Image: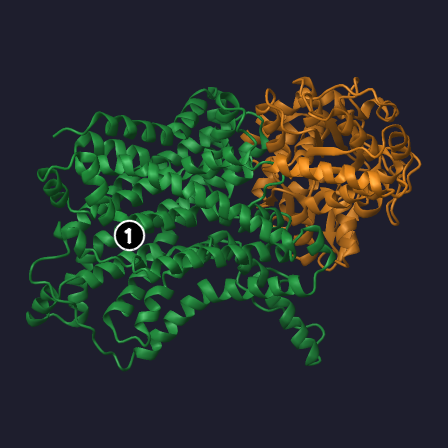
């Protein structure tokens, strides 16, 4: 049965709208004169290309190692407190990488917390001119890799852990009986089964690195996004920023197509009717060592930002300084910015989640080369820098809807489009979980397609859709560039305040809004976990 | 919601204004307006590329004189705000732009972004530092200087010219603002005008080859020099004074005294054409040029007031002590675009 016309039209509208920013960039970039392209190719692009690609490679390698190791340790060994680690190791997703970067900067920069404490201690011990402490240089490729990696390794950890839990014991047991060592089993049986999950996670990490702006800017590491910002902020003409964006999009597209293929391949590996849970092996000698390693990762990715930012927030509230007053932290200022963030993020996430059901439903129920291609295209702006999306909306709103430009409504509209590619991706997964056979049964029993969707598919997909909403909401809470460009005067969000303070190097005053942001995003993530949606079993997808 | 709140505040402000005598405004400008109309009331949206921490004290001073004017500021980068004003030209959102680069002001004025202003306080400013029709006016002056860390460099090894910073001798030792910064771009426009295309290109390429650390603004540069991340920073003069006042071990070099001289730029104010509140906007600009407004810039931020007779902060030598570059930025705005192309080609971040 062909899809209803309404569904097709609705899908085309949603997909078309989410593609608008992409169209805007292509048009602007192609309108650039040849001289600009040649200046950029000789001046900017070569170093940007090598910097960006290097950071993608190192971060993917680091998160891959971290994510796979931790997932294996949690799911396959008798690590003390396994049930707690399962969700603690997912929590770094709630910490925006630029916020993590700020807390690392506060500690590790010259004249930072670590250095000052050391100097004071040495002074107490009678050494007034101590040898400088060898502090690691965080303004480097290594610093950026570690700080970003510690925030995004759950992208690898979560799917790998879910696959490990969903895998049947059968194959591993057979390999074991056939005489493979523990390492041999892992290398020849487990790892190939994990490959799709690792690939999917690695692609998400790679796309994240390509689109990240705040972290690399703070860590002074030049990538395409920081250069796009420079071109945008330094030039009244948008052509150069668009041209650089086009190169970035070209880098991203293969990753996007790779991601949708990896997601499809993943379904072949799990499942089977003889499914039995994998064996947890006791490793008495390694137990506490692995515990220490997991604790170190958690301490660096969660403990450090929460402690530093929380401490500074308490200080700003208890002992406000002149600077705190100027930056209006420590009083109702932060709460107001928190409310602004919540308002925009909640409304935008809700509308983006609802709108995403149309294209998601079409591609799940009517799989076709065309719908698959359309969906992949719709997701393309996912990795666009938010700056570009914001920019295209400054132009489009002024041209087509000047009344809502410079209002909260306009900001929310731009946020919805910024979120659509993500909500389509996560919404599609949620809908895939509702077996088509049940819907068909409802149709046979006399429901029309709309009531079959409403009475059968929607209730089954609701937990997945709620999970999708939460993830989209968290992205909206963290969103920086769209808010910088489109906020009405006087309507600052938490990320805008963090950014304003951090870009003036007053990191202490960035702490209270950053702390509140982490609290709100981790509360959302904790809610998701409490309802059991985070480590969704992949088996349920296979059975239908 | 915001406008409803504003209306409510306006009502409250009017009620309060009727029943409670407002303290006498401290400035002359305020007196005249205050007597004529009662305390002015309303809202202003000010776009500014100035650091929030530098601009808020001026706003607070303004609100001491005009407690019933609610000023909402939107901070942003110099070029970003200029682009925003251009995009919004048919749908103006801002009343006033306060920025820190004269070239950007004159470019925007040429695009017709600002409304003419024939206020006597504006007309009193020297012609080189205002638009002919008063569409924009300079508020303060600031020369480009080099600041250094005194624990890392001895006085006899200091660079004497800005050009020296491109010398391989200073590899990895310099911090600077990048191409998004209005003051940095204006410096390059001046250098290109005085020294020519080839020398300026060599200078930029030298900075890049020297692994110079580039930042969006100068605050990061001055903090890094103070903390000893690198010994030299190319900044506006007051960044040195701000670091010095914080107790950082820093010194200042007034460069090119045997050569082209000091390059002096200005901070400026312009009233946006289509402003919903042009009267208040004029009041705001007049206040910025009043002794009370000028004093805040001079005292809190060590800048050179454009209005004569306002005292300089302690430790700030008068500009007449130095050889100044023989240029008028106002006439150079058309050189901004070719300079940007040059910077792009030379790979300035």
- In the picture as drawn, the residue positioned furthest to the right comes out as B309
In the picture, measured across the screen, residue B346 lies left or right of residue A445, that is: right
Q: Which chain is orange?
A: B
Q: Which quarter of the rendered picture does the C terminus of chain B lie within?
A: top right
- Find residue B170 and report its horizontal and vertical position in percent: 65, 48
Tell me the residue at 27%/44% (across/down): A259
Location of the N terminus of chain B by quadrant is: top right
Above or below residue A125? Residue B282 is above
Q: Quadrant of residue B139?
A: top right
On the image, which quarter does residue A63 sit in?
Answer: bottom left
Q: How is the image coloured?
A: by chain
Q: Is residue A513 visible?
A: yes
Q: Which chain is green?
A: A
Judging from the image, what secondary structure is the residue with disc 1 in? Answer: helix
- Asked if one can make out residue B231 in the rendered structure from this viewpoint, the answer is no
Q: How many numbered marks are there?
A: 1
Q: Position of residue B9 (x, y in %)?
A: 70, 39
Chain where mark 1 sits:
A
Crowd class of label 1 (few under 14; some 14 to 19; many from 20; radius 10 Å): some
In the picture of the structure, the residue carrying the numbered disc 1 is A463
The answer to which quarter of the image holds residue A195 is: bottom left
Q: What residue sits 53% from the left and 60% below the top?
A: A104
Residue at position x 56%, y 67% from top? A134
In the image, taking residue B63 as reference, residue A346 lies left or right, namely left
Residue at 68%, 47% in the rendered image: B219
Would residue A387 appear left or right of A535 to someone viewing this image? right
In the rendering, at what x and y percent does residue B297 appear?
Answer: 81, 42
Q: Position of residue B112 (x, y in %)?
A: 67, 17
């Amino acid at each position: 049965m062909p899809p209803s016309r309404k569904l097709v039209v609705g899908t085309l509208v949603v997909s078309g709208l989410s593609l608008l920013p992409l169209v805007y960039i292509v048009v602007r970039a192609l309108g650039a004169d040849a001289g600009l392209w040649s200046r950029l190719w000789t001046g900017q692009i070569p170093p940007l290309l090598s910097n960006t690609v290097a950071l993608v490679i190192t971060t993917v390698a680091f998160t891959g190692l971290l994510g796979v190791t931790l997932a294996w340790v949690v799911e396959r060994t008798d690590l003390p407190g396994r049930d707690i680690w399962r969700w603690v190791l997912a929590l770094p997703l709630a910490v925006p990488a630029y916020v993590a970067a700020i807390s690392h900067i506060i500690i590790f920069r010259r004249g930072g917390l670590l250095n000052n404490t050391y100097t004071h201690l040495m002074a107490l011990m009678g050494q007034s001119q101590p040898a400088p402490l060898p502090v690691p240089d965080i303004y480097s490729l290594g610093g950026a890799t570690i700080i970003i990696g510690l925030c995004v390794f759950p992208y690898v950890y979560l799917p790998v852990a879910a696959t490990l839990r969903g895998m049947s014991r059968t194959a591993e047991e057979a390999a074991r009986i056939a005489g493979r060592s523990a390492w041999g089993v892992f290398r020849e049986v487990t790892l190939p089964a994990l490959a799709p999950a690792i690939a999917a996670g690695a692609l998400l990490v790679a796309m994240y690195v390509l689109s990240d702006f705040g972290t690399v800017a703070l860590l002074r590491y030049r990538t395409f996004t920081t250069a796009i910002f420079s071109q945008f902020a330094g030039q009244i003409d948008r052509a150069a920023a668009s041209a650089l964006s086009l190169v970035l999009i070209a880098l991203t597209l293969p990753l996007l197509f790779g991601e949708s293929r990896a997601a499809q391949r993943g379904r072949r590996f799990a499942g089977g009717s003889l499914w039995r849970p994998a064996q947890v092996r006791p490793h008495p000698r390694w137990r506490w060592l692995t515990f220490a390693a997991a604790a170190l990762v958690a301490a660096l990715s969660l403990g450090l930002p929460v402690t530093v930012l929380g401490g500074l927030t308490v200080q700003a509230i208890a002992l406000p300084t002149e600077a705190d007053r100027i930056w209006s932290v420590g009083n109702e200022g932060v709460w107001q910015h928190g409310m602004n963030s919540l308002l925009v993020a909640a409304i935008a996430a809700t509308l983006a989640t609802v709108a995403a059901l149309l294209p998601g439903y079409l591609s799940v129920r009517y799989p076709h080369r065309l719908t698959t291609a359309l969906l992949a295209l719709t997701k393309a702006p996912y990795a666009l820098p938010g700056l570009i999306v914001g920019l295209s909306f400054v132009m489009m709103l002024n041209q087509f809807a000047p009344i809502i430009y410079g209002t909260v409504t306009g900001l929310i509209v731009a946020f919805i489009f910024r979120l659509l590619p993500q909500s389509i991706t996560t919404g599609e997964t949620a809908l895939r979980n509702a077996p088509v056979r049940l819907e068909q049964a409802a149709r046979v029993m006399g429901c029309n397609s709309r009531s079959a969707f409403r009475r059968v598919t929607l209730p089954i997909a609701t937990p997945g859709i709620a999970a999708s909403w939460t993830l989209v909401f968290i992205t909206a809470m963290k969103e920086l560039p769209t808010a910088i460009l489109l906020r009405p005067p006087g309507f600052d969000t938490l990320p805008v305040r963090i950014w304003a303070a951090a870009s003036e190097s007053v990191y202490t005053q960035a702490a209270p809004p950053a702390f509140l942001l982490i609290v709100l995003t981790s509360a959302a993530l904790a809610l998701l976990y409490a309802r059991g949606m985070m480590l969704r079993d992949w088996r349920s997808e296979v059975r239908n | 919601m915001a406008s409803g709140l504003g209306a409510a505040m306006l009502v409250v402000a009017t009620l309060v204004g009727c029943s409670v005598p407002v303290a006498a405004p401290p400035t002359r400008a305020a007196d005249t307006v205050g007597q004529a109309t009662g305390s002015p009331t309303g809202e202003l949206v000010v776009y500014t590329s100035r650091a929030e921490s530098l601009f808020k004290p001026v706003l607070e001073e303004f609100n001491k004189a005009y407690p019933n004017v609610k000023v909402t500021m939107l901070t942003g980068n110099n070029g970003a705000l200029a682009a925003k004003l251009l995009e919004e030209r048919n749908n103006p959102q801002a009343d006033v732009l306060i920025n820190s680069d004269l070239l950007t002001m004159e470019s925007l004025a040429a695009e017709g972004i600002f409304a003419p202003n024939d206020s006597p306080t504006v007309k009193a400013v020297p012609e080189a530092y205002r638009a002919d029709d008063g569409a924009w006016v300079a508020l303060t002056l600031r020369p480009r200087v080099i600041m250094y860390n005194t624990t890392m460099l001895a006085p006899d090894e200091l660079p004497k010219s800005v050009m020296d910073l491109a010398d391989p001798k200073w590899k990895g030792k310099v911090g600077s603002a990048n191409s998004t910064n209005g003051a940095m771009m204006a410096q390059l426009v001046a250098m290109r005008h005085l020294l020519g295309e080839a020398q300026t290109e060599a200078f930029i390429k030298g900075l890049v080859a020297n692994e110079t650390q580039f930042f969006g603004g100068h605050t990061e540069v001055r903090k890094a020099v103070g903390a000893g991340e690198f010994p030299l920073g190319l900044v506006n003069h007051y960044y040195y004074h701000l670091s010095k006042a914080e107790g950082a071990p820093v010194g200042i070099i007034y460069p090119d005294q045997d050569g082209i001289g000091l390059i002096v730029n200005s901070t400026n104010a312009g009233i946006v054409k289509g402003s919903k509140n042009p009267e208040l906007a004029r009041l705001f600009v007049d206040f910025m040029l009043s002794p009370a407004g000028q004093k805040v810039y001079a005292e809190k931020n060590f800048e050179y007031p454009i209005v004569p007779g306002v005292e300089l902060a302690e430790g700030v030598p008068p500009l007449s002590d130095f050889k100044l570059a023989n240029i008028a930025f106002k006439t150079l705005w058309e050189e901004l675009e070719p300079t940007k192309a040059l910077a792009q080609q030379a790979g300035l971040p």
